[in-house]
Image (tube, grey):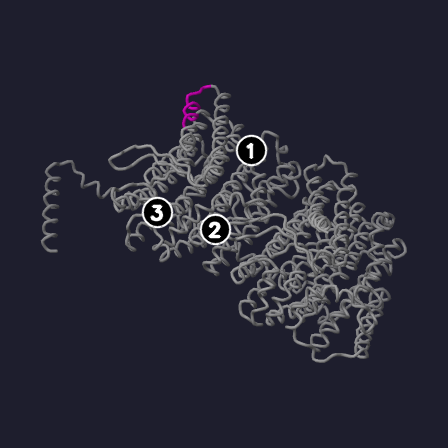
Amino acid sequence: MNYELRMINLIINLIPLFPLLGFLILGLGFNRIPAKVASVVGPGTVLLSFAGSLIVFFHLLSGHGTGGSGRIVTTLFNWISFSGFTISFSFLMDPLSLLMLLVITGVGFLIHLYSVGYMKGDQGYNRFFAYMNLFVFFMLLLVMGAGYVMMFIGWEGVGLCSYLLIGFWFKNQEFNNAAKKAFIMNRIGDLGFLLGIFLLFTTFGSLNYLDIFGQVKELNPGTGVLTVITLLLFAGAVGKSAQIPLFTWLPDAMAGPTPVSALIHAATMVTAGVYMVARSNILFVLAPATMTVVAVTGLATVLFAASIAIFQNDIKKILAYSTISQLGYMFVALGMGAFTGAMFHLATHAFFKALLFLAAGSVIHALGGEQDIRKMGGLGPSINKTRWVFLIGTIAISGIPPFSGFFSKDEILSHLFNRSSILYIFALAGAIMTSFYMFRLYYLTFHGKFRGTAEQKHHLHESPSVMLLPLFILAGLSIAGGVINLPAFMNGSAWLQSFLAPVFSDALPFLKPPEFEPGPGLEWLLVAISVVCVVCVIPVAYLWYVLSQEEERKEPLWQSFLRKIPANKYYIDELYDTLFVRPVMSLSKGFHEIGEKKIIDRFVDGIGVLVVRTGNTIRYLQTGHVGFYVFMMVAGIIAVLIFNLVI
Amino acid sequence: MITGILIILPLLFSLVVFSLKDEKWIRRMAVTGSVLEFLVSLYGLFLYSTQCHCQLLLNIGWIESLHISFRFGLDGISLLLVLLTTFLTPLIILSSLDHPYRKPSAFYGLILLMEMAFIGVFSASDGLLFYIFWEMALIPAYFICAVWGGNDRIRITFKFFIYTFTGSLFMLVALIYLYLHTPAPHSFEITYLYAAHLTAPEQIWIFAAFFLAFAIKIPIFPFHSWQPDTYTEAPAGGTMLLAGIMLKMGTYGLIRFVLPICPVALKEWGWIALTLSVIGIIYASVIAIRQSDLKRFIAYVSIAHVGLISAGIFALTPKALEGAVIQMVSHGINITGILIIISLIEKRMKTREIPQIEGMANRAPWLAALFMILLLGSIGLPLTNGFIGEFLLLLGIFERNVWMAAIAGMTIILSAVYMLRMYQRTMLGKLREESPEISDISLAEAVPLIPLVIMVIWIGIFPNFFLQLAEPAIREIMNLIHG
């Protein structure tokens, strides 16, 4: 028994250690390590972590050695510790972190495997895997940590890796700009997160989840300090998960190699914000105001990002906006208290979005780097396998049954319907847009006539099997992923619901109960409505983007005007540039040229001049005549005497 | 005893180096002396942690009639700074070896002399002794900058000298005033100074005088205008000594003298100092964004970083103070490392102007990687040394004043802005066609950098050793503040 517990503790500690080891080997070995070794070390370490996660998962399911609490806490060492202030390096294993763990290492491994083919022959092959392994390490710290500081370590660490990988091809300064933008925007959110951590500490005297969540139940719902804490934490989530207003870095982040977009900017890192809110569920439900902010932010992001996605022409950017939009769904769900629904959508989204990105990578690969869908078209026959897996991903994200995305999205939609019909209608509108832009993307890429160059047509080729295998596995998961949480009205077991129940059980009593409990009939009706809606737009997309062959349709002025605004992303980048970047730059110039040179330097010089002048004046007193000195001395003595007499 | 050796040893080696003619031997003796000194300080650490966890004392009579004597003592804070000095000095000397400095005997001799003065400042437990070493450090610094500096060195160095010397005079006045108010028989000994009877208005004057001296040395906004010029004009090794070690004399002085001697004044007027420090963080960070000379850039970065340290000191909370001490060590390590990198860049590109440098990572990937690690330490990424200090400092300031912490916290955004901008401009991008043939970092060049990089990560992952070293001394100072 004791032996078993120690084994499990060891495995838990090894899970993040494997990728770290991989990073050290590849990082220190640099280019001296042959690419073949890197191809084994890179994906291999993540596979080991996946195996470890599975072992811990089944151990936790069996319920041994957790004392019935359903969680394991292991402490590696005391990190910061003095004068009674202690932050330890410890891990918390519970259903929530395990779910994240399996997604990260599982999907992460597949993407690593895919990269072996995708990055083949790249100059920085080893460096790529070193960064990817480092990313997995920090991501694991983020979700395994037993407290907010541990989460923050991982949080900032994945930000660094995101920076390094977006700017992976560092010869291109545009890419470097994108990388820098991502890091800085994330840090804006991180400041909020950090202040939230400080406020948590001053309020609860600890930064461990279990300590805080244990105490927080004694506070009254809506306590001001909780609202502030959760808003600050949410600021961090907004940055990391690319929600309004800190979302503009994610589309730019597509500068990185496609596997990076799949792993970091779709499946894992950007969902860290969702994980954070879900982890802090008890704090958030006790701050109803924040919950509203979360839901509204999420919903606004759903619609905003989807409307931009419709008008984009870069295959990866469309997927990026769709990621922002799908993350928005998760936040709506969180804000309405559907924590399981958010985590369910997080998992299925990881499957189908990773699939879509990797398939897009396969397309880009086939076309020798082309990303503009206006120059694609008719690729279906030549890269048939890629086409099919892409279609599977498209159906899944559109929410068409029985693919995984349908179940997770439907759970969120029905949850919304029971609580707020307005939110439901907007969310449904978002789903319709999703289906439309995804099928637009699919049709423009794989159907119609080929619009690229003759040379590209000549070189068209299907990707190697090392890239296809992960695609097939992800396609399988995208189809069947829904089974982990089949709803009860479909005679499902809602397994995920019961698995995660211990994590969210404390929060549920504080949630507003639904306005009414829908019967199975209504549930089926809702399903029918949403399915009909999303399916209906598919023929429209087909009509517009395949059948109508006119490349440039004449459109009325107002229409082109309407199109232009979302096509230019509502000019948000330009707005931020005018509002923040330029003022800071002018301030910098102003401080330097006026503050430094005109004010402070002049003032200091002024003192210098004053001293010299005073010296020049006083100098005349030193006449050298003894008589003058004697006179001054006597005068002085008399002055002192008079002074004393008067006082 | 050990403290005495620590002070005598660099002096002896400095005299030896001064007297040597052969360049090879000058370098050998300079390296030997500084490394030996480091080993002795390690032994001191060993003694400290095994024997007593209290002070390592040395007391020799000097001017009996005035009760002035050579009193030295090392507590946790002093010891950390002594270790920082003895750790950095050999690395600074090593990184200077391949520069063809004129009159190397004088150059290295002065560095060792400076090291002695630093050790004296950090270990003196007597106000007058502290002052003497404080001024003694200024003289070699002046000569190093004035003799081996850039084109404008004479004017700039003169400004530096006058500026800091003026500040020191205020400190001297304050010390003498304090001496006269110590319990009879008057003494400059630190415990006597702590026990001086001062009324509240007197404390405010003493506080103002000390603050001026230390604020100039650190420097705290708006007393910093000597610093960017001096850092830019000084020779590479000189800048490292100034930024890596010398400015810690100021922050150390605040902790050692101002906090225990003027608690009442601090409670009343400390917020001004806190506010100035926080303004300095934002002000210098914003200026740093647009700087084009790498050394001037790093000068402003340094003002921003030490602004956070001094803000933490004036926050008067144990966590902020602990953070300030660890951050003094980290700042010394990081800025010395970055300055070494800058000197390597200058050596290769023949310029320090950021717009003229691009794409060095293409040819010098190891240089770029080491640079990145130091940079991450400097922007306080978790698991690097900078995070420990920044986290504790901001948390400590937060406990004092939420808004000050929020404004000071902007440093985590601004530091990313200026650092990544600079890194992108110099290291990333394509190598220009007209740029000279550049090579990656050589083993000899890497020798001084690698210990620094290791420390960046070591302190980041295992900060406890350092934090606990300083803990008893900090507790003592907190007791003195809160009476």
Q: Give, as a three-letter code, the residue at label 1.
A: Pro
Callouts 3 and 1 in the same chain: yes
Where's the C terminus of chain A, which quadrant? bottom left
Tell me how far mark 3 sits from mark 1, CA to CA.
Answer: 35 Å
Host chain of mark 1: B
Task: Read off the residue under disc 3.
Answer: B210
Q: What amino acid is labelled 2 in the image? A: Leu
Q: Which mark is residue B275?
A: none
Say which label, 2 or 1, has the lower sequence index.
2
Residue at 42% x, 56% y is B275
Relative to A75, is B340 on the left or the right?
left
**Residue where numbered disc 2 is placed:** B308
- The subunit carrying tag 3 is B
Q: Examine the rendering and report whether any part of residue A251 can be seen.
A: no
Q: Earlier in the sequence, mark 3 or mark 2?
A: 3
| Location of residue A580 by image quarter | bottom right
- Give the residues in magenta: B11-21
Q: Secondary structure at mark 3?
A: helix
Total marks placed: 3
Q: Nearer the viewer, residue B441 or A626?
A: B441
**Which amino acid type is marked by label 3?**
Phe
The first of marks 3 and 1 along the sequence is 3
Location of residue A320 (image quadrant): bottom right
Residue A33 location in percent, x, y?
A: 74, 36
Image location of residue A417, percent across then percent down? 73, 76
The residues bearing labels 2 and 1 have C-alpha atoms spaced at a distance of: 27 Å
Left or right of A601: which side holds A72?
A: right
Overall secondary structure of the magenta section:
helix
Residue under pointer 1: B448
